[in-house]
Amino acid sequence: MENGQANGSANGQDFLRVEDVVKRFGAISVLKGVDLHVREGEVLGLIGDNGAGKSTLLKTITGFHRPDGGRILIEGDEVNLRSVSQARALGIQTVYQDLALVNELSVFHNMFLNSEMTVGPFLNNRKMKEKTAQYMADMGVNIPSIDTEVASLSGGQRQAIAVARAVYSDAKMLLLDEPLAAMGAKEGALILDLIQRLKDERGIPMILIVHNYAQVFDVCDRINLLRNGRIEYDKPVADSSVEELTELVVSEYRKARETGN
Amino acid sequence: MSETTGESATRETAEAGTQERGLVVRLLSGLIRVREVSILVVLVALALYFQAVNSAFLSPQNLLSLAQFAVPYVVIASALCLLLICGELDLSVGQSFAFAPIVMYLAYDKLFLVLPLAVVVGLLAVAVVGLINGLITVYLGVSSLITTLGMFFLLAGLNVTLTGGFPATTPDPSSLTQALGESAWSGTVWALLIIATLQLVLARTRWGLHTYATGGNPLGAREAGVSIARIKIGNFILCGMLGGFVGIIEAFRINSIDPLAGGPDIVLLCIASAVIGGTALLGGVGTVTGAFLGALVLTVLRNGFTLQGISAYTFNIILGAAILVAMILNVYVARLRGAGR
């Protein structure tokens, strides 16, 4: 994909640009020159088959992996990410599939994990509770109590907390890895609403990394398909359709079966 | 009209009924959840029983010996508790308990250091032991069970080698030796101070919160930016140092530095104490208060049986049964809680 500038519904400059990024693990090239960009306020759906390199790309953008080639630009400046915390300091927040929540801790302790509020050497639990309640109300997230252990919450509620935590750690951009994994329609709707609100009210640019594109199609501005280590498809949702994407995927499976036989 | 009010009234009472039952269930499950309460009940029951069968149990002399006997166990169990919560284990802490006073003694007797400095050298030695345990476990990826098992034998050999296998007498009495365990209640005061501090650290500080997070979800904690290596190594060092410190206190109390003081009994009893007190061996769950009460229960059991003239063999049978029952209950209660969701 040679900078096929598709016009999404969101306008403005690129918040993130990934140019010709290569990532190898030993002899295996997972990313073979990925070009990708996300504009301010834009929601990009990044789709691809299992093992297509979606997670590798995600981890390269968040500083977990260092690319073997190419460059990454944030707000127009080339960055050389060495660690996850460095990417985080630049405002790139990730919500992982495994959620990064600690089941044994309360909602508000999870909310402030590693950015705790303190009075002298001690935790300021009262203030963290107040803030958490306020954040949850602002984001329209309903949970039984912020004192409960995260373990007792549903998948959707846990995901919402993880998203809220990312948003309130000064996120300039959110990367959501399989935000609807293992969720039913009702739970999933909760998260999609949340994503829609974040987009409408805060204009936070997002990348949704998804296997099942049909679920998230409506909240995305643009769809990218990662295949064979490259972005092979880049269209605004207005010019795309779930059917077209399905056809793309199905044809790939057909090809695989034919060559397999 | 009247029909509808009657209907809504019955519905209201029914709702109130379920609410009340909900409250009772919540209270009960809350009490079960507060593990410390049930151990406290067991502790009080044991004390009452032993007092009933032998009125000497609650005598001032026996309370003192009970307190003195408990000091190493409650401190080591509490220190181990933090380490267990962050997902690791230290089998060598009993040997650190013996090692610190030996190093202190050698620094004092052979290197002619003043006693305060010798104490510091002893504590540094066990801090290094903790550091090595931590580094091997965290950076070389060896399970802490194996790391500290190796360290256990290494220190056991070192303890005997350094002393020639014979106990040594502690340095001459001074106000420092008095404060460090020689005077009757000083060990108890230290133990209570240490336990209160550990509980505060665990429940009220970032270190404590990160200790829970590290054991509960290591991957998630790391993704949130928690340095789990720092937390684990720090807790290894803390465990080694507190084990060593209480070893020095015990040495001054009995005026003897015993190279064989660190046998497997002490660490196994302390792990048992922490587990009885609700600490999860796999990390993420536990409290210092629970470990403290667990250690007290075991101390009271042993002391009470000794007063009754029951042998150490019987004590082991009862201890074993107590651990099994506690663990079965633990699994059962966890299942109940899971089902209640």
Image: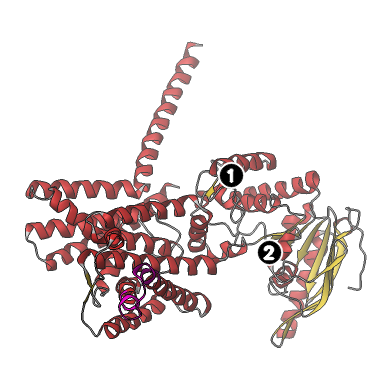
Crowding near pointer 1: few (<14 within 10 Å), some, many (20+)? many
Q: Residue at x 30, y 53 (%)?
A: B189
Q: Of A219 and A151, which appears nearest the observer?
A: A151
**Magenta stretch: dominant SS?**
helix
Res A83 quadrant in image: bottom right
Residues tagged 2 and 1 counted as in contact (Cβ below 8 A):
no
- Give the numbered dot on residue A128: 1
Same chain? Circles 2 and 1: yes
Q: Residue furthest top?
A: B2
Q: Earlier in the sequence, mark 2 or mark 1?
A: 2
Residue A143 position (above or below residue B210)? above
- Give the numbered dot on residue A229: none
Residue B53 position (above or below residue A92)? above
Magenta span has B111?
yes
Please give the residue where the numbered disc 2 appears in the rendered image. A85
Q: Of B163 and B24, which appears nearest the observer?
A: B163
| Left or right of residue A228, residue B241 in this image | left
Label 2 is placed on what type of residue? Ser
Label 1 is placed on what type of residue? Met
Residue A151 visible here: yes
Q: Of A101 and A250, which appears nearest the observer?
A: A101
- Magenta stretch: give its range: B105-120
Place of residue A204 in the rendered image (x, y in percent of width and height, measured from the top left): 79, 52
Place of residue B94 in the rendered image (x, y in percent of width and height, measured from the top left): 31, 71
Residue B90 visible here: no
Place of residue B62 in the rendered image (x, y in percent of width and height, measured from the top left): 14, 53
Res B111 quadrant in image: bottom left
Q: Chain of mark 2?
A: A
Q: Chain of mark 1?
A: A
